[in-house]
């Protein structure tokens, strides 16, 4: 199964339903289920930003799954729409946000799976 390593707090924001798009500097043609892997790094400058959600962050584990249903080139219109939906989550992150990977059918795992992540979309064989 395909997996994607995402830094915290972003991985948990997806799994908890606050973030419906994952932003990347590159596009993907892949559509289907992916595992959401919380990477080993935590962007501490964003922890306070999302304190209102009272989230617990993970490191180095697969925390759930989602379906990639679309990959959209981010333009001003999409950027404006997302900021209206949730300015806290979709305000500028400091990352290159050229493509928005639309995620649906998000499922949080009861027991996270410890595994070392990788760059890009990678294959996880359990």
Image: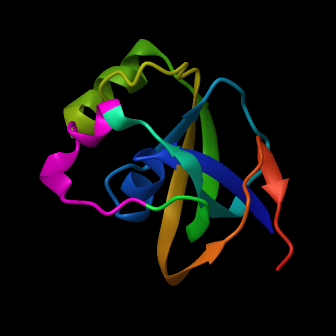
- Report whether 18 appears left or right of 5: left
- Report whether 112 appears left or right of 55: right
- List x then y, in percent, for residue 2: 78, 61
Q: How many marks?
A: 0
Residue for point 21% across, 32% down: 87
Query: As rendered, which of 53 and 43 lies closer to the eye?
Result: 43
Q: Is residue 122 above or below residue 64?
A: above
Q: Is residue 80 above or below residue 32?
A: above
Residue for point 65% across, 23% down: 25
Quadrant of the frame with the N terminus: bottom right
60 within the magenta span: no
Query: As rendered, which of 46 and 98 lies closer to the eye?
Result: 46
Colour setup of the view: rainbow
Q: Is residue 27 above or below residue 6?
A: above
Quadrant of the frame with the C terminus: bottom right
Query: As rendered, which of 122 and 90 lies closer to the eye?
Result: 122
- Report whether 4 appears left or right of 79: right
Residue farthest toward the top in the current orientation of the protein: 76
Residue farthest toward the bottom in the current orientation of the protein: 110
Q: Is residue 18 above or below residue 34?
A: above
Residue for point 68% across, 52% down: 4
Residue for point 71% across, 27% down: 26
- List x then y, in percent, for residue 8: 45, 47
Q: In the picture, residue 43 is in which quadrant?
A: top left
Query: As rendered, which of 101 and 118 lies closer to the eye?
Result: 118
Magenta stretch bounds:
45-57
50 within the magenta span: yes
Q: In the picture, residue 15 is in which quadrant?
A: bottom left
- List x then y, in percent, for residue 52: 13, 50
Residue farthest toward the left in the current orientation of the protein: 52
């Amino acid at each position: 199964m395909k997996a994607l390593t995402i830094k915290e707090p972003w991985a948990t924001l997806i799994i908890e339903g606050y973030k419906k798009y994952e932003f990347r500097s590159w596009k993907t043609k892949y559509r289907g289920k992916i595992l959401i892997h919380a990477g080993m790094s935590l962007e501490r400058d964003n922890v306070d930003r999302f304190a209102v959600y009272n989230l617990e962050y993970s490191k180095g584990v697969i925390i759930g799954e989602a379906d990639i249903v679309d990959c959209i080139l981010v333009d001003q219109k999409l950027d404006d729409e997302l900021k209206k939906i949730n300015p806290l989550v979709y305000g500028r992150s400091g990352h290159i946000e050229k493509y928005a990977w639309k995620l649906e059918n998000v499922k949080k795992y009861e027991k996270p799976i410890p595994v070392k992540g990788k760059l890009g979309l990678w294959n996880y064989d359990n």
